[in-house]
């Protein structure tokens, strides 16, 4: 996997009817400080697409992006792994460390 330059979020990963999730603001601030482009698709093969749905995984793959499963519900996450995402996270707060890991691995 190439080092990540951008992350695109499925809107359902950022908020629900009650508003933004608690982990959104701190995770986005840290990722922006790392120089990660958010919400802008550039170089699809180096762009993560964060999603919690099978449709999102398919959409990411069709666009040539890296599908990352946001695993809010353990049972649903197990089912969605059958769609072969490139990776998975439980919280957006894990994204900065995930990006650091990929950067450390190199191209």
Image: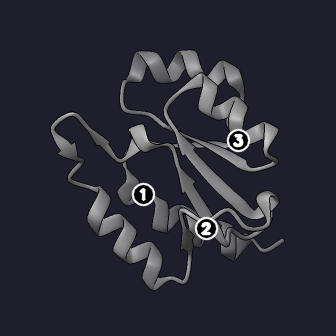
List x then y, in percent, for residue 93.
36, 59
**Quadrant holding the N terminus:** bottom right
Tag 1 secondary structure:
helix
Q: What is the spatial separation of the Cα atoms under label 2 and label 3, in whole angstroms?
A: 21 Å
Pick whichever of labels 2 and 1 is earlier in the sequence.
Answer: 1
Q: What is the spatial separation of the Cα atoms under label 3 and label 1, in whole angstroms?
A: 20 Å
Q: Which image quarter: residue 86?
A: top right
Left or right of residue 4: residue 30: left
Are the residues flagged by discs 2 and 3 in contact, CB closer than 8 Å? no
Are the residues flagged by discs 2 and 1 in contact, CB closer than 8 Å? no
Pick whichever of labels 2 and 3 is earlier in the sequence.
Answer: 3
Q: Residue at x 35, y 65 (%)?
A: 27
Q: Which image quarter: residue 87?
A: top right
For residue 60, the mark is 3
Q: Residues within 10 Å of mark 2 (few under 14, many from 20)?
A: few
List x then y, in percent, for residue 32.
45, 78
The residue to which callout 2 is attached is 101
Pick whichever of labels 3 and 1 is earlier in the sequence.
Answer: 3
The residue to which callout 1 is attached is 94
Tag 3 secondary structure:
helix
List x then y, in percent, for residue 55.
62, 25
């Amino acid at each position: 996997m190439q080092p990540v330059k951008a992350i695109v979020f499925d809107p359902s990963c950022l908020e629900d009817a009650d508003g933004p999730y608690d982990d959104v603001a701190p995770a986005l601030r840290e990722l922006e400080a790392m120089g990660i482009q958010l919400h802008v698709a550039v170089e699809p093969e180096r762009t993560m697409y964060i999603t919690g749905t099978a449709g999102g995984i398919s959409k990411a793959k069709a666009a040539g992006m890296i599908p990352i499963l946001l695993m809010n519900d353990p049972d649903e996450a197990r089912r969605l792994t059958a769609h072969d995402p490139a990776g998975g996270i439980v919280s957006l707060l894990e994204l900065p460390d995930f990006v650091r890991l990929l950067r450390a691995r190199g191209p």
